[in-house]
Amino acid sequence: MKRSPLQMTQDRRLRLIGLRLLLLIVVIGIWGIGSLGAPAFILPSPRRVFGVWTQLVITPGFWADFGITFYRIAMGFIFATVVGVVLGLLLGASRTLGDFFQPLLVVINTVSSSIWAIFALIWFGLSNWSTIFVVFMTAMPLILTNVWQGTSTVNRDFIELAQTFRMSRLQVLLKIYLPTILPQFFAGARLAFGFGARVSIVAEALGASSGIGYRLRQAADLVQTDQVFAWTLTLVILMIFIEAVLLKPLETRLFAWRKPRPA
Amino acid sequence: MSVVQLESVGKSFMRRDGEQLEVLRNIDLDVPERSIVALVGASGCGKSTLLNIVAGLIPPDQGTVYLNGQKSSAFRDWRSMTYMFQEDRLFPWRTTAQNIALGLEAAGMPRAERRDRVMQVLELVGLEKFADSFPHELSGGMRSRAALGRSLVTEPSILLMDEPFSKLDPSIRTQMHDEVLRIAALRQMSVLFVTHDVEEAVVLANKIVVLMPRPGRVKETREIDLPYPRNPLSPEVAEEVRLLRLSL
Ligand SMILES: Nc1ncnc2c1ncn2[C@@H]1O[C@H](COP(=O)(O)OP(=O)(O)OP(=O)(O)O)[C@@H](O)[C@H]1O
Ligand SMILES: [Mg+2]
């Protein structure tokens, strides 16, 4: 009997979940075997890390650190999105502006995030703004570049059609430009979020007195390797959670109009 | 009165090698109120360019365009004219209903009112069942009908169409001809359209303008005085088709 497209999607999803679980078991297995031959301060066993993690989660300070890191990433990302989208659209709309600022963007893109972290430390000291700034400087150029490139894929025929309907500039922006750049924006924002989140840890390790990055450095300074692993695990879980619960469903919803790719 | 009038309109394009390509020369054209005018001519003789000029998308190099008796530059009522392009130009991220609603959104019509109008038009072009489909889920013919719907929903008084029915199969094409004639009569609409199909021109138009290529010039203007509806199998229509073929 032929399976309906819905059933086939479900089949594929089940298969994927199975594969993911298998991968998880393999990774933990190798880690476990590896930890047998190493002292705990080099490579703690999965069981030990899990034990430390469950203890960590119930300390009240954990959620405060977790929360402050998430807050800094989110703030940096939100600023980056607003500035990146507005500037990207502006540069896309005006050729002169685009040509003028192009080299600046290249320069910003070549400056490593760690250098931004050092600048942040100099300018903002030990404060939330250090981390927010670093996340912003990492994420904003990525979003800007994607939005800018997205504007050049706008279909001229659609603009012409809009002209025949005498659509206003704002309408053209909202009804043609925005939907056109959305896939590119989304790809860029996703990348930017990932980079931003990773670099926020470095920033916190250097220039903060709270947050996951700060705790990681503390644990490393005290050679509490199991703690380092536990915090890392926390981060990984946070990122997977955001990807699976926020980004993926949003993407599916926003891009329902796309022609499905052949399986 | 004429809704569209062209006086010795000429247009050249700069080719990429720097040479001037004269596309239209000395075009006089007249679309009387409530008439249907067909433009026929070989591929590349400037038919789409002519419609683009009438729609105000590109300026003519020579001559003048009058819309409702006003110079095109002084014309303000652009929303009373819609243009169905040679390509459907449906937004891939919009459903059929949303695509059709575009012109109403542009005019700032409230959502509730829009819905009724869109429903009517969906029925008119036979796409009620595909209101929520995205363009990639429609056949070529359905896409043309959606594009036609988008041009009709704002109830224009001037409709420009560039080979509107070329992607439809014959039975649906006949149906669309009937619809266009009905809507044109009902809404007192004037139509200027391009076609390759000689029979289509004779069945629909009061007047057929034959263009000849390189550069595009008016070769002949034929008035078709047969009563509607015109049966393509009737001898009168067949005779007009034959005469038109001869002049092409
Ligand atoms: N923007 C442009 N720049 C340069 N040349 C152009 C441009 N638009 C049209 N042309 C040229 O003008 C000529 C007429 O084009 P047009 O599209 O008006 O022809 P057409 O009569 O509509 O043809 P068809 O029946 O194939 O659609 C063609 O030779 C084309 O190459
Ligand atoms: Mg054409």
Image (cartoon, grey):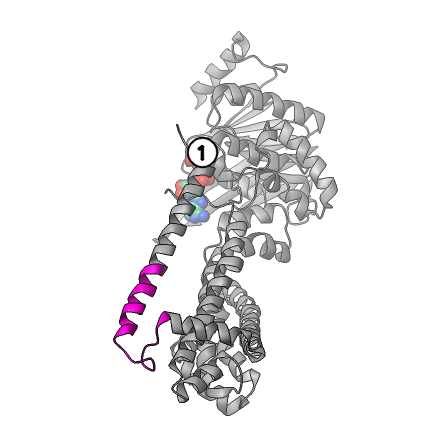
A1 or B133, which lies in front? A1
Q: Position of residue A28 (x, y in %)?
A: 34, 65
Q: Is residue A36 magenta?
A: yes
- Which residue shows up at 45% across the image and 33% down it? A4
Dot 1: what SS?
Answer: loop
Q: Position of residue B95 (x, y in %)?
A: 57, 41
B42 or A108, which lies in front? A108
B104 or A26, which lies in front? A26
Residue type for callout 1? Ser
Q: Position of residue A93 (x, y in %)?
A: 53, 63
The chain that hosts pointer 1 is A
Label 1 residue near ligand 1, CB within 8 Å = no
Total marks shown come to: 1
| Residue B47 to residue A194: above or below | above
Residue with the mark numbered 1: A4
Specify whether residue A57 is in view: yes
Residue stretch in magenta: A25-46
Q: Position of residue B198 (x, y in %)?
A: 48, 22
Q: Which residue occupies the extreme left position in the image?
A: A37
Residue B161 image-quadrant placement: top right
Quarter holding the N terminus of chain A is top left
| Residue A201 to residue B30: above or below | below
